[in-house]
Amino acid sequence: RKEVEQDPGPFNVPEGATVAFNCTYSNSASQSFFWYRQDCRKEPKLLMSVYSSGNEDGRFTAQLNRASQYISLLIRDSKLSDSATYLCVVNSPPGYALNFGKGTSLLVTP
Amino acid sequence: NAGVMQNPRHLVRRRGQEARLRCSPMKGHSHVYWYRQLPEEGLKFMVYLQKENIIDESGMPKERFSAEFPKEGPSILRIQQVVRGDSAAYFCASSPGRSAVSYNSPLHFGNGTRLTVT
């Protein structure tokens, strides 16, 4: 079983739509969780950390469910510029490596 | 502040040649991570180094790959006798200290080196 699993998509949504991505992780001892964004052929960039209590950053909301070992990302009022691949990232003991999902592709259309 | 700097951006090598990828961490950072992204795949951890020390190389292929981070100068990822399967994007990230990657020190990546083996 892969450490981090995501639906690869693609998700095609119109501008203004709300879209949600889920991700599951296999190691129950995982300690920290992140969403990164990767544009085509570019480096991954940190979008937001995911805390147990859930957190929000503008149009983006991240949730963590430790019991079910899944993480979600909700994007409200999608913009064309949100088109990218969204990477679910988990840090597990002993903590040196980040484990990346393969990513979920989002295309926001006019 | 300059971010993580990688060079070259693009590198083309023939099968059997050597590839050297360089990474200069952010100012004040003494720990470097290397990741590889094969086409259509997620990023995979390769190695974690601090100056003059390899901390974790559990993700490095057993042969042909090596990494160093000398006291002076950039970190180097070296691939000897490259094969077509080594074609990938290689990303470097840095952190200020030996904290397990945590909310206080999430990784920030350089813009990568794209290696093409012909």
Image (tube, helix red, strand yellow):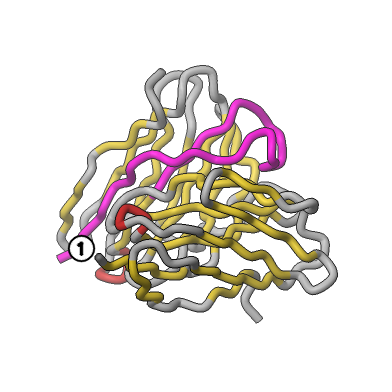
The subunit carrying tag 1 is: B
Front-lying residue, B109 or B81: B109
**Left or right for B58, reference A86:** right
Q: Residue at x 26, y 53 (%)?
A: B114
Residue B18 spot, x, y in % from top left: 26, 51
Residue A94 visible in the displayed image: no
Q: Which residue is drawn at 43% across and 42% down?
A: B92
The image quarter in which residue B117 lies: bottom left
Q: Residue at x 55, y 69 (%)?
A: A21
**Left or right for B66, reference A61:** left
- Farthest-out residue, bottom: A1
Rendered-image quadrant of the C terminus of chain A: bottom left
Region in magenta? B91-118
Q: Does the magenta stretch include residue B109?
A: yes
Rendered-image quadrant of the N terminus of chain A: bottom right
- How many marks the image carries: the answer is 1
Q: Is residue B19 magenta?
A: no
**Left or right for B8, reference A55:** left
Q: Hey, what amino acid is under mark 1?
A: Val
Q: Which residue is drawn at 48% across and 27% down?
A: B70
- Circle 1 SS class: strand
Mark 1 sits on what residue? B117
Q: Vertical placement of A27 versus A80: above or below?
A: below
Residue B84 visible in the displayed image: yes
Front-lying residue, A81 or B24: A81
The image quarter in which residue B30 lies: top right
Front-lying residue, A11 or A40: A11
